[in-house]
Amino acid sequence: MSHFLPETDAVLTAARGLALAHPGMIEVNDSPLYLRARDADPARTVALVSGGGSGHEPLHTGLLGRGGLDAVCPGEIFASPHNRQIYEASAAAAKSGGVLHIVKNYTGDVINFQIAAERLRHDGIPVATVLVDDDLATDSADSATGRRGTAATVVVEKLLGAAADRGATLEELADLGRRVVARSRSIAVAARAQTSPTTVNPAFELDEGTLDYGVGIHGERGIRTIARPATYDLVRRMTDDLLDALPDGPDDVLALVNGLGATTELELNAIAVLLNDELTARGLRPVLVVPGTFTAALDMAGFSLTLTRLEDGWAELWTTPTRTPLVLPRPIEGAVGGENPESPVRTPANTPAAAPRQTGDRALLDRYALTVTQVRDNLTKLDQLVGDGDFGDNLAGGVRRAVKLADETGMDGTAALADAFLNDVGGTSGPLFGLLFQHLAAASPADGGAPTAAALAEAAEAGHAAIHRVGGAVPGDCTLVDALAPAAESLAAARDADAPEAPLTEAAQAAIRGALATASLRPRRGRASYVGDHALGVPDPGALAVALLFMALADIHEPATAPRLPAPGHITVI
């Protein structure tokens, strides 16, 4: 991120760092600045030279070497290289067949590469240019500049690098590059702007719950701001726009899922599957689906999709091995040559359904699901202060799985919660909640009626004991036990004495007091224990979730006295 760029000569220092990390592969010329590959394939007769503003790494420099580029000219951050850099890099790298420039369609890049090409021709060096202009967000008849050059540059450089190592001529490479560009289109979205190296703040602001659609790789705002849809809806919309703009051609496509700097590999891999499914559903054959960060915009939180219609032999060029800093991931192989290999992913369609179970009371599941949905973001924010920030999503995801399971199998609501949390929810808290739900499920009568206070007391005590055996937590450790233990004790006291009028209300109030009291505790277990005094003042999210569970129980069975639950549209933690 731009928080830690060196104060001076940042780009030169980074170039030296790349060469240091790949000894024997790259040499750096510092005045003017360019990087040159040391290990060219002897069959290559034409040098490939590219470059552009820095901040897009691993673009250009990542494909420097055998099977890729011969020289790269990095400009300052988001600024084109100077024509002298390009001229001297090209002259140094030139081979018997000349030099091919691969240029992204930005005014500064185009002008400086053109001037360098004129100087090379004056020296008698054959030169040709491939102009990459794949960004459909800037495809406007009103613009004289034309489409911007973005992530399709990676496709061009990789295919031309493989072809050059096979001895292709300057004319053959230029023709191939122009055909690849013509068959490629890209579109990008962002949820957060890149960090400005000058201000160390986001370069532009986006309201919560929105995306910029059609952003550029230099951090340019999108062509429109949209309400943030579900990811699969976003991928579907982007796919529709790409296919509307992509020229007709073969059904075989290469699909590049490119991170813009701050998007994780986890997200990119998931998006790749969604894109693969969208393409397949439209009758296309995604021969190569390649997720990764290839063309960044510093640390922008977003991604782009690139589609290239493949001609015969292009897939083989893509999979040709390279010796470059960037090791391209093994493609997710789709339908190759009409064959459809069995998917390694088990989906609901091919996963055996759970055996039907006893139908029972759904009230607790439905009430808890509503509550968790309302407070998920609050729980996440609290967990970000003391942990890794995943608690709200894990809890909400587990509840959604339980609802789906109960809907599909007729399983009792509490049993569905136990099944979902024990079998499908990861992390530490998920299985622990699963143990609690498992014991609560045992309190439900087989006929689907309401559990008795005595049965719930026994279940809460058993759940508390199981969680202690597994995790060792005791009250005062600042965990979910700080809410569960007082609730269980309250129910046990009501069972062992003359029962009060509202034992669940009393238990819920005890759980609330225990959960809120965790704000004054220094955590001794769990991830919160790693942050020490930074956790003081923050109630434990797991304890709050337990309190909400007992509040839901009280709301169902003792609605006149139960503590108030969050109302729809009024989102609070307690």
Image (cartoon, grey):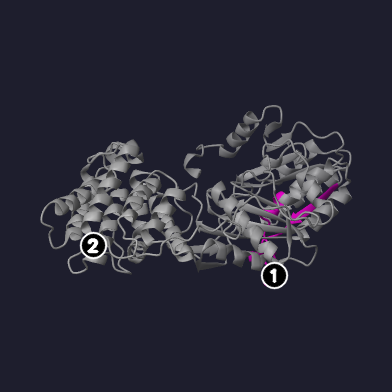
Bounds of the magenta segment? 127-154
Residue 171 coordinates in the image, percent (x, y): 88, 51
Residue 152 sits inside the magenta stretch: yes
Q: Relative to the observer, which residue lies in front, 147 or 478?
A: 478
315 relative position to 373: left or right: right
Q: How far apart in space, not on screen, are marks 1 and 2 (Cα)?
A: 54 Å
Label for residue 382?
A: none
Decide: is 46 above or below 241: above
Q: Which residue position is annotated with label 2?
A: 554
> Disc 1 on helix, strand or loop?
helix
Q: Relative to the observer, which residue lies in front, 85 or 208?
A: 208
Residue 130 coordinates in the image, percent (x, y): 78, 53
Q: Nearer the viewer, mark 1 or mark 2?
A: 2
The amino acid type found where label 2 is placed reads Ala
Rendered residue at 31%/54% (across/down): 440
| Residue lying furthest front | 447
Rendered residue at 64%/59% (across/down): 275
146 relative position to 357: left or right: right
Residue 122 sits inside the magenta stretch: no
Q: Residues within 10 Å of mark 1 (few under 14, many from 20)?
A: few
Decide: is 547 above or below 15: below
Q: Which residue position is annotated with label 1?
A: 244
The amino acid type found where label 1 is placed reads Asp
Q: Relative to the observer, which residue lies in front, 119 or 521?
A: 521
Rendered residue at 29%/57% (across/down): 549
Decide: is 477 above or below 538: above
